[in-house]
Amino acid sequence: MNGDAIRYESDQFKATAGYGARKRNLQLVFFDAQYPEPEQTTDSLPSVESQTMSALERVEAAVERSGIDLDDVLRTTVYTTDLDRIDAIESAYDAYFDARRPAMTVVGVSELPNDAAVQIEATGVKR
């Protein structure tokens, strides 16, 4: 484990009280799938890394429109047509998110719109 994930729980599981207290003033925000700009996919077929960066820029724009920060994004799901390029996707994430990178799940798919190599969904929290 790299130490990036910190979990605070004051609630330890007990046989008589299986449900713990949670901070209540939070609201999850879900962001629809974001693709790279269309001209970055069909015309010149740039690298998976540059397509990931483009999709992340679109995620950031959606996040800002919702009134939260990129630091409030907790989780992303990346759909990719090229599972052999996970290193390139992770490299783009490392470059895009300085110190605090959200949790990421990568899912392989056979095809995406506009011949894109990546699509990114995100979940954030409004405090």
Image: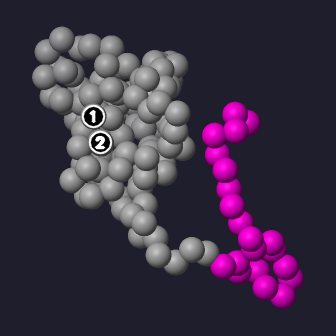
Q: Which range is magenta?
A: 1-21
Q: Nearer the viewer, residue 118 or 124?
A: 124
Q: Is residue 69 a member of the stretch shown in magenta? A: no
Position of 3 with respect to 112 (left or right) is right
For label 1, the residue is 57
Residue 10 in the image: state x and y as whole percent.
74, 71
Three-letter residue code for mark 1: Glu
Three-letter residue code for mark 2: Glu
Residue 35 in the image: state x and y as whole percent.
26, 36
Tell me if label 1 and label 2 are in contact, CB under 8 Å: yes
For label 2, count other residues whose C-alpha is less than 10 Å away and answer few (under 14), some (14-19) or many (20+): some
Picture quadrant where residue 11 is located: bottom right
At mark 1, the secondary structure is helix
For label 1, count other residues whose C-alpha is less than 10 Å away and answer few (under 14), some (14-19) or many (20+): some
Spatial CA span between label 1 and label 2: 5 Å
Position of 78 with respect to 3 (left or right) is left
For label 2, the residue is 60
Rendered-image quadrant of the C terminus: bottom left
Which secondary structure class fits the magenta region best?
loop
**Residue 74 shows in the view:** yes
Q: Residue visible at 33% across and 56% down?
A: 68
